[in-house]
Structure formats: structure tokens, C-alpha cells
């Protein structure tokens, strides 16, 4: 892979209009942002360009926007929060067309160092219409606003959308720079190195609910890592593939043969594939999910009762997985070990997070629920890198070419 992309340090932005694709897809409850992690992650790039005298035009999507433009999915709260954390006014352009007359006039009136935020890019259906060429018109309109383009939205880098990758064609045609921001560079450096040239031993930990979500990642990581640890709901399909009774545990019958293939692949290639040796079981899924009064039992992985379901890794498995991490030099983790949203069923996930916090290895958290768990449990500052993109980090770990990364200019 050896990606060597142009960054914001590689061109002079003074006096130039720079369109920056950010990832401001933040949770908003009753008009208030409940987690501003992604906003804060964008600050280094924004500050750098603004201080260099660029005219900064920020854009992002928010939510899935299934029913057309609406105020609930407007980026207005993001502009407000961004102004607060920057200590500088960020002008919000509420234009539902995103690139209409109001936007054009605002850009024309900008001074060096000014920052504006455009409306939700998904208010334009062309942003994500398939096939990807359908976004050409919107991409061309976005490019018309700017001289240069910077992608700092790793969470969207795996999508060939108008504002992520297609826009670069039009910026390049006019002689502009297409670069990555500091956040994107960090993701490329950590995840790229983990995949292509890890310091060994390299341990990969995969959890979460479904095998199907991580088919290609399991296969790819088995070729690259020394030890692959499986936890979470997906582990029970592997246990079924070993011929074990898994009771009412999460199971994908269609992937049992695939799990057998992966276990055979690990054995033939001399890789360790670690599966739970005991599991915490419950009688029924907690309702609500964080109900603390749920009753649990611990059973060996080959003795799960037919009327129980696995909900977390057990104490013997915690010890096994923690030991595997101790000797590692590089660890990549994606997916929780159990129903971590429930305090009674979070022990496995917390123990893995603790093991990563205690090691001297380079520790990379691959976004999504594992990032949420690490943040929630207070281990964030102990990790080398926490990816801002769940789906994007998985595809990167697979070795896929992410459109938002590859669209940037090479140095």
C-alpha cells in the first residue's frame, strides 16, 4: 500500500478557497450534540488552514436523510458547536441546495481566515446516488466554490460520493490541490502500517454481532496477523463450526462452513485463531439493553445449555485473550466481546480494553462500537490510535482502496 499522499502541509493555502470534507456526522438529540468527538477531531486541520489565511469552506453529511431536507438533519448545531470549540465564528449557510446562490454569495464575500459551513451534503440526492457518476453535477458545483480540496473525513472515505472523491476530478482540472487533512493522514499512517508492515507479533481482535459483516476482514487479517482473536456474537458461529451446542446464541447458519474454512486456513498457515473457551450466558436478551438486574451463568464454550444464549466472554477466556495481548507489538481491535451496553455484560470488553491499555504495543481501535466502548470505559487516552471510521477502517484493514484516500494527490 505505502500510501504517500499530499497533506495540508504540502501546499500554500493563503488567500485560496479551500473546500474541506469533514466528518460531522454526530449524534444530535433535541437539537443538541451529545458527542462532539468528530468535531474536535477535525480541529487541527481547520485551525492550520484558517491560520494560514485560507478561505475555508467546510462540508459534511449528517444522518441518512431518507425523507429529503429537514431541520432535524441540518448542520446548524454543528456550526454552533464548532464556533464554540474553535473560539471563532463559523458562518452556517442554511441553503438546502448546498451550492445555491446563498452559498455562492457567502463564498464571494469571504476574507482570509474566514470559515463557513455548508448545509448537509445529503440534502442533495446526487451526493450518494448510484452509480457513482450520478454525483458529477453536484461534485462540479462544489468544486466551483473552491480552488483546492482537502478530505479529512475518514469515516466517509470508503464511499465514492460527490463530496468525498468525485469532486477531486474537477478541482484537479482547474489546477488545484487535492490533499488529505491531519486526521486522514493519521488514519492512513496507523491503519496502513498495521496492515502492510506491522511490528510483530501482530494480534488482531474481532468482535461484534455478525460474521457476515467481517467475512473479508477475517480472511485478510488471517494472512497478515500472527494471532486472530474472535469474540462477540460472531464467535458462536465459529463455536457451532467446531460442533458445539450454542443454544439460543446469535448464529449465522449460512456462515458455518466459512468459519470451518477460516479455522483450517489458520491451522495450515501456522496462525493462532483463538475462540472463547467459556461464555457468560443469559436466558433472554436484556430489555432494555442496559437493564442491570439481568441474571447470568458461566458455562464452558462446549457446554452452553440449549435454552441459554451467550452474551459475553467468560473469565477463562478473558485470561486467555489478555495473555495473548501481553506479548504483542501491534494490536488492532474492532468489535466488542459481548453486549457491552449492559453493565453486567461488559466485563469481557472492558478486560480487553484494559489489556490493550496495559501493553506497550501500538494499539489501534478500529472505530464503531469498540471505539465507543473504549471512550465510554475511560481507556481512550491509553490507546495509540482510535479510528473515526467503523466501516472505513474495516475496509482499510481488508486492504481495499478507499475512494476518499486514493482520490488525493500523491506527493
Image (cartoon, rainbow, N blue to C red):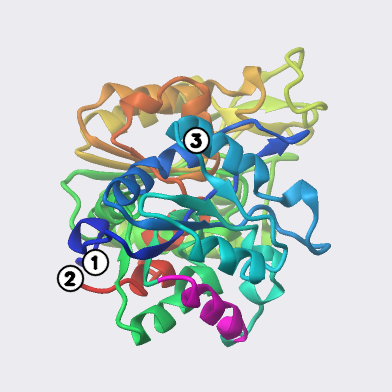
The residue that disc 3 covers is 37
For marks 2 and 1, give the CA distance.
5 Å
- Residue 104 lies in quadrant: bottom right
Tag 2 and tag 1, C-beta contact below 8 Å:
yes
> Which element carries disc 1, helix, strand or loop?
loop
Identity of the residue drawn at 56% across and 47% down: 91
In the rendered image, which quarter is residue 41 located in?
top left
Q: Work out whether 182 lies above or below 283.
A: below
State the residue at coordinates (45%, 20%). 378
The residue singled out by tag 2 in the image is 411
For mark 2, give the secondary structure.
loop
189 or 169: which is nearer to us? Answer: 169
What span is in magenta? 134-146
Residue that numbered label 1 is attached to: 5
On screen, residue 250 versus residue 396, left or right, reads right
> Badge 1: few (under 14), some or many (20 or more) residues near its Cα, within 10 Å?
many
Amino acid at each position: 500500500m505505502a500510501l504517500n499522499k499530499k497533506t495540508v502541509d504540502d501546499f500554500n493555502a493563503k488567500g485560496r478557497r479551500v473546500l474541506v470534507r469533514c466528518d460531522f456526522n454526530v449524534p444530535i438529540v433535541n437539537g443538541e450534540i451529545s458527542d462532539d468527538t468528530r468535531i474536535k477531531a477535525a480541529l487541527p486541520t481547520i485551525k492550520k488552514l484558517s491560520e494560514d489565511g485560507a478561505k475555508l469552506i467546510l462540508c459534511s453529511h449528517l444522518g441518512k436523510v431518507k425523507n429529503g431536507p429537514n431541520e432535524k438533519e441540518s448542520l446548524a448545531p454543528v456550526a454552533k458547536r464548532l464556533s464554540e470549540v474553535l473560539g471563532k465564528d463559523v458562518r452556517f449557510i442554511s441553503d438546502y441546495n448546498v451550492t445555491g446562490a446563498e452559498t455562492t454569495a457567502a463564498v464571494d464575500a469571504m476574507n482570509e481566515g474566514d470559515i463557513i459551513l455548508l448545509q448537509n451534503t445529503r440534502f442533495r440526492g446526487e451526493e450518494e446516488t448510484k452509480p457513482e457518476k450520478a454525483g458529477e453535477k453536484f461534485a462540479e458545483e462544489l468544486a466551483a466554490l473552491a480552488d483546492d480540496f482537502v478530505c479529512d473525513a475518514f469515516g466517509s472515505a470508503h464511499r465514492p460520493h460527490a463530496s468525498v472523491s468525485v469532486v477531486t476530478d474537477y478541482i484537479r482540472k482547474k489546477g488545484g490541490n487535492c490533499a488529505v487533512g491531519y486526521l486522514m493522514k493519521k488514519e492512513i499512517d496507523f491503519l496502513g502500517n498495521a496492515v502492510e508492515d506491522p511490528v510483530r507479533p501482530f494480534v488482531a481482535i474481532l468482535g461484534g454481532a455478525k460474521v457476515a459483516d467481517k467475512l473479508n476482514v477475517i480472511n485478510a487479517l488471517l494472512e497478515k496477523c500472527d494471532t486472530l482473536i474472535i469474540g462477540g456474537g460472531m464467535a458462536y458461529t465459529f463455536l457451532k463450526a467446531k460442533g458445539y451446542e450454542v443454544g439460543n446464541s446469535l448464529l449465522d447458519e449460512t456462515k458455518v462452513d466459512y468459519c470451518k474454512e477460516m479455522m483450517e486456513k489458520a491451522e495450515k498457515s501456522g496462525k493462532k485463531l483463538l475462540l472463547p473457551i467459556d461464555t457468560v450466558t443469559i436466558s433472554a436478551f436484556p430489555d432494555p439493553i442496559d437493564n442491570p438486574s439481568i441474571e447470568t451463568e458461566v458455562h464452558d464454550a462446549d457446554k452452553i445449555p440449549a435454552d441459554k444464549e451467550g452474551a459475553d466472554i467468560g473469565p477463562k477466556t478473558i485470561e486467555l485473550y489478555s495473555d495473548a495481548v501481553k506479548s504483542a507489538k501491534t494490536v488492532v481491535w474492532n468489535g466488542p466481546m459481548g453486549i457491552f451496553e449492559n453493565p453486567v455484560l461488559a466485563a469481557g470488553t472492558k478486560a480487553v480494553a484494559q489489556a490493550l491499555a496495559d501493553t506497550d504495543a501500538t494499539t489501534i481501535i478500529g472505530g464503531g462500537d469498540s471505539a465507543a466502548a473504549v471512550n465510554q470505559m475511560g481507556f481512550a487516552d491509553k490507546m495509540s490510535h482510535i479510528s473515526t471510521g467503523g466501516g472505513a477502517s474495516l475496509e482499510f484493514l481488508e486492504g481495499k482502496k478507499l475512494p476518499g484516500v486514493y482520490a488525493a494527490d500523491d506527493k
